[in-house]
């Protein structure tokens, strides 16, 4: 059997440790093989996963897999100015947005105070350089209702399960209306684009993606920043779009 290549990224991956709380649990897998969002299966070491109880069922809410990182990294890499992150998760996206030199400040809005306490107890932001940590603040609140006190350039939104869910676009539009963000990246936007392309029966190319983004009505980060964005959307859809 061929062993997959070791997953490596230039993005910041925090160090986590096991945690058991009231509704949340952090687990660390010493070694696992995971498929990416658009990359092939890769070997991941010390893979952390944040899990939550839903009744009698425990679900993985977020993890440091290639899939999770690749499905958020475009927003982190191309964020700029005053940036709002909706949903703290494991703190990874907020930390990497703050590490972006083009980002001046990062405000994270998280609904669950236990998640805020968990990330704080792990010292996720304390692992960053002091000047980067100084850009960050975390607020407890409702992502769909939060209104900032100053202009926002970038909105990064990730508050949902599953990856390909309904009503997401309308919720992001509400967040954008509240924040006035001029640029937006939301988790699973590639699935929204691919899903619409399948409904229309068209191939994913530059013109099709531009048409669908215009139809969605959000200033999405990705199409203008990455020449191969349509190909990335197509690869991600082949792996993760499950409703076709």
Image (cartoon, grey):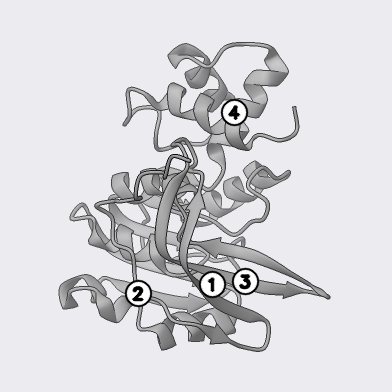
Whole-number angstrom distance, CA of label 4 to CA of label 3: 26 Å
Q: Residue at x 56, y 22 (%)?
A: 212
Q: In this figure, which residue is indicated by the disc labeled 2? A: 15
Whole-number angstrom distance, CA of label 2 to CA of label 3: 17 Å
Q: In this figure, which residue is indicated by the disc labeled 1? A: 110
Q: Secondary structure at mark 1?
A: strand
Q: In this figure, which residue is indicated by the disc labeled 3? A: 51
Camera-nearest label, 2 or 1: 2
Q: In this figure, which residue is indicated by the disc labeled 4? A: 238
Whole-number angstrom distance, CA of label 1 to CA of label 4: 31 Å
Q: Earlier in the sequence, mark 4 or mark 2?
A: 2
Whole-number angstrom distance, CA of label 2 to CA of label 1: 21 Å
Q: Left of 129 or right of it: where is 91?
A: right
How far across and how far down the image is residue 213, in percent?
Answer: 52, 27
Whole-number angstrom distance, CA of label 3 to CA of label 1: 16 Å
Q: Earlier in the sequence, mark 1 or mark 4?
A: 1
């Amino acid at each position: 059997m061929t062993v997959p290549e070791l997953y490596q990224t230039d993005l910041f991956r925090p160090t986590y440790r096991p945690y058991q709380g009231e509704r949340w649990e952090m687990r660390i897998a010493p070694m696992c093989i995971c498929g990416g969002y658009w990359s092939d299966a890769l070997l991941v070491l010390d893979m952390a996963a944040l899990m939550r109880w839903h009744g009698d069922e425990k679900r993985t809410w977020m993890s440091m897999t290639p899939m999770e990182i690749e499905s958020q990294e475009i927003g982190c890499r191309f964020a700029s100015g005053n940036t709002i992150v909706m949903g703290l998760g494991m703190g990874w996206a907020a930390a990497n947005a703050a590490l972006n030199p083009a980002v001046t400040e990062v405000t994270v809005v998280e609904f669950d105070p236990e998640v805020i306490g968990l990330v704080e107890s792990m010292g996720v932001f304390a692992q960053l350089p002091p000047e980067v940590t100084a850009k960050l603040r975390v607020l407890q609140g409702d992502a769909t209702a939060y209104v900032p006190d100053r202009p926002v350039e970038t909105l990064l939104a990730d508050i949902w399960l599953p990856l390909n869910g309904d009503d997401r676009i309308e919720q992001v539009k509400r967040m954008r209306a509240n924040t006035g963000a001029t640029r937006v990246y939301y988790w699973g936007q590639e699935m929204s684009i691919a899903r619409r392309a399948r409904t229309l029966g068209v191939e994913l190319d530059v013109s099709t993606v531009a048409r669908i983004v215009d139809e969605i009505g959000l200033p999405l980060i990705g199409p203008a920043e990455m020449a191969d964005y349509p190909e990335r959307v197509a690869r991600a859809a082949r792996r993760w779009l499950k409703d076709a």
